Amino acid sequence: MIVEIALVIPLRQVFDYQWPAGWNRPKLGQRVLVPFRRQKKCGLIVGIKEKTEFDSVRQVLALLDEHPIINSELLDLTKWVAEYYFCGWGEVLQAALPGGLGVHLQSEYSWGPSRPDHNSKLPEKFSGLLQRERWTDQEWKEMNPSTTDEELRQSWLDDGVLKVQRHLVQQRAKIKTERWVRLKNTPSDKLGKSRRKKTKRQRLLEILLECDSVSWLNLRDEIKAPASLLKQLVEEQVVETFEERVFRRFLPQGLPAPTSFQKLSEDQQNVWTLIEQSLDTKKYKAFLLHGVTGSGKTEVYLHAVRKCIELEKTALVLVPEISLTPQLVNHFRERFGDLVAVLHSGMDEGERFDEWSRIQLGKAKIAIGARSAIFAPLQKLGLVVIDEEHDQSYKQGESPRYQGRDVAVYRAFQEKTTVILGSATPSIESWQNSRTGKYHLLELPSRALTGAKLPEVELLDLRQQPRQSGCYFFTKELVKALRICLQKKEQAIIFLNRRGYAPVVQCPECENTINCDACSLSLVYHQSSEKLRCHQCDYTQAFLKICPNCGTQTAMRLLGTGTEQIEQDLRVVFPEARLLRMDRDTLHGKHALSEMQQKIHRHEVDIVIGTQLVTKGHDFPNVTLVGVLLADLGLNLPDFRSAERTFQLLTQVAGRAGRGEKPGRVLIQTNNPHHHSLRTAQLQDYESFVNQELPLRERFRQPPFMSLASVLCISRDEHRAKDLALSLRQNLRSNGLGQVICQGPAEAPIRRINHRFRWQVLIKASSAGLIRKIFEKSLLGPEPLICSREENIILDIDPQHLM
């Protein structure tokens, strides 16, 4: 019998292996260990057949699972993802499984009979190995071996000077267990209703007579019983102990949430009626829920999930960012308790493994999480919810480069269930799908709270507005509004989508900008750490006092601003105000964000300064003022989606104001007040924005009117990267004549990252399938593109960024 194995390697194929005679029949979704080249690798069984087209195939070495760890629906889903996004099936399967299921080989080295003597000319860093009997591969890597060192080790292995043993190390996240106690034989102790004080032994036995079994930890805490008592009862064969699995839980400290279902408004009820009908039909249907900020989309989700549970189905709820998880989880846990499981990358490996296991075992019926939760092993799926469906965080940046929103919609289609895509600012692709009938449009045009209105939004022209003295990036109008807000004991949010203190550091003498050595980006000054940091590769260095270009010892010029500088300026203008900066630099620890949210909710903060973290779905009733400092930042990016993102960002951050009973006000500072994305954001008029944006997309043949893919040709050699891109373009034009549009090649907007140069080709066609077909021909055709180990060609289907 032959099994087809998907390996976790960047190759778009599966491999045939012989199933050993005498083994039980294989099952799809089981993991196995197989030989691959000179290594042993873990893979999943994705196909079973009687014969192979090859003359001979190698044999499976070990079966790692008694039962499949992934069901047939998820196998089909991951296969579709691999095909659509042009990546390895094994890579997608790895993304679908929790880290705690990892398998790896650990190599252990020891000296053979002819160990080198102490006079051998070994590199100094390896001299300590002569005194050791054995060491692991990890310890070798910690010595930072060079290519020459690796060659030396291989020669030792070839000559028998060094011996190696490899051990399979399975499952990094261990199953956590707890000791339980139960009666083994009826005790001879007299346990009547005596008035005399009972001994700990008597109390322990009475509890065990009432219960089938009890956790020893709970029992010990309840009656303060010593371990010696348990040991004695086990020796007397009165009781026996056993290990019971316990699940580690991720319990984020979210904001207070209602414990009961809220009465729906008239708009919510109209929307809910249509969704409920769809849930009852048990067929695929996609709803685009367009509701203004604060319109109560979450309450609609909760009602839909309750209906799903009543139908004995499961539900998947996706959020784009970890930052939104605590708040949403709290809403669901208050209603559904332990039926809720959480999955996202910010959890410990053990927590994530146990939550995944609870879903797989059917103990949790509702999975909530960020992008990777799409692959939660839910059985009998009845509902998929995609909150903030427009958010670019749903797109994976590394391979497999899938768009989580679209994969979730496909999963709903595949499992014939209802999907709800919710947003105040839907993506243009989703809006177009609602126009063409692929999605059914639902509207929530007003805020859910009785009397609550959308905030007033004003555009402040930075070219005309007077600036605040000593606080250059604030207009006097914004400072005045902040002062009034503080006098009323209300809260404000200041939004600037740029962290750090200053984005550019420049020598005042030669005007040289301090750039990252590895990337074609300027280093950002962070005052809190007194360091310069690259926001692309995370390289850091001390702040410079001598210009590296001209050698002048001088005070460097700091250009531009960031959230650190804004915080400092506000402390000068409002010394009594309690400030909180909310950006990636202030988030330390997995509960940091939820703790910040609670501080804001308890009104321990007056002004919040933040990046886009503050825009995402937070609900702070006492926030009445939002100030946007530099609204044009995103418009200057060379990306056709820049206007859409600017509109979404401004509308979302404006929606944080006036969500309670008090009216809200939003002040947007800009140098370009006439741009359509800003004018429509001021009116909070999504349809008006789309009606102006869609003709531009159609004219320039951009999504959603054409499918788009980005190809990056990457090499340490700039000329080689360009040559690869030129060859690719030539192949694409030859293979796709009249079927695809090629733009480029050109240097990518960020031309170098991590010492690797990047050239870009954009491909447009009527469908993603046509792009994949022609791209594959161009790579493997009569004139195939050959890459060295230092080079790479990356295809990104439906890219969200073109940088």
Image: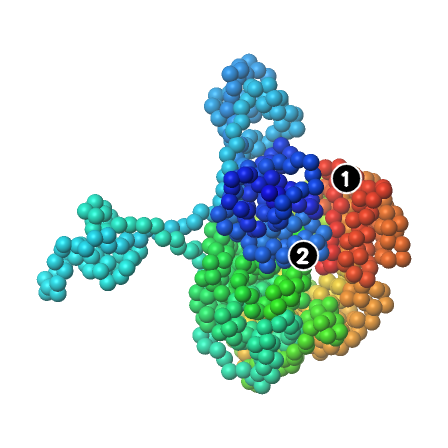
Asked whether residue 405 appears in the rendered view, the answer is no
Please say if 173 is above or below 251: above
Query: Which residue position is annotated with label 2?
Result: 80
On the image, the x and y values in percent for residue 380 come to 54, 65
Question: Percent x, y for residue 237?
Answer: 21, 48
Q: How many C-alpha atoms fall within 10 Å of the one at disc 2: few (<14), some, or many (≥20)?
A: some
- Residue 636 lies left or right of residue 470; in this view the side is right
Question: Which residue in the structure is indicated by mark 1?
Answer: 787
Relative image position of residue 96 (x, y in whole percent): 58, 54
Of 114 and 608, nearer the camera is 114
Identify the element where label 2 is drawn. Answer: helix
**Side (left or right) of 419 relative to 132:** right
Q: Is residue 299 left or right of residue 543?
A: left
Query: Could you say which is closer to the camera, residue 44 or residue 241?
Result: 44
The correct choice, above or below, for 440 with respect to 645 in the image is: below
Q: Which image quarter is the N terminus in?
A: top right
**Pointers 1 and 2 in contact (C-beta within 8 Å):** no
Q: Nearer the viewer, residue 146 or 428?
A: 428
Question: The disc labelled 1 sits on which kind of residue?
Answer: Cys
Quadrant assignment, res 219: bottom left
Q: Residue drawn at (72%, 62%), measured in percent from left and top?
A: 633
- The residue depicted at 49 percent of the width and 45 percent of the height is 172
Rendering quarter of residue 382: bottom right
* Residue closer to the observer: 28 or 237: 28
- Give the residue displayed 29% in from the left and 57% down from the top: 214
Instruction: Tell me where residue 17 appears, x and y as whole percent.
Output: 62, 40
Name the amino acid type tagged 2.
Trp
Query: Height in image: 37 above or below 792?
Result: above
In terms of sequence position, does the residue under pointer 1 or pointer 2 come before the other? Answer: 2
- Distance from Cα at disc 1 to Cα at disc 2: 27 Å
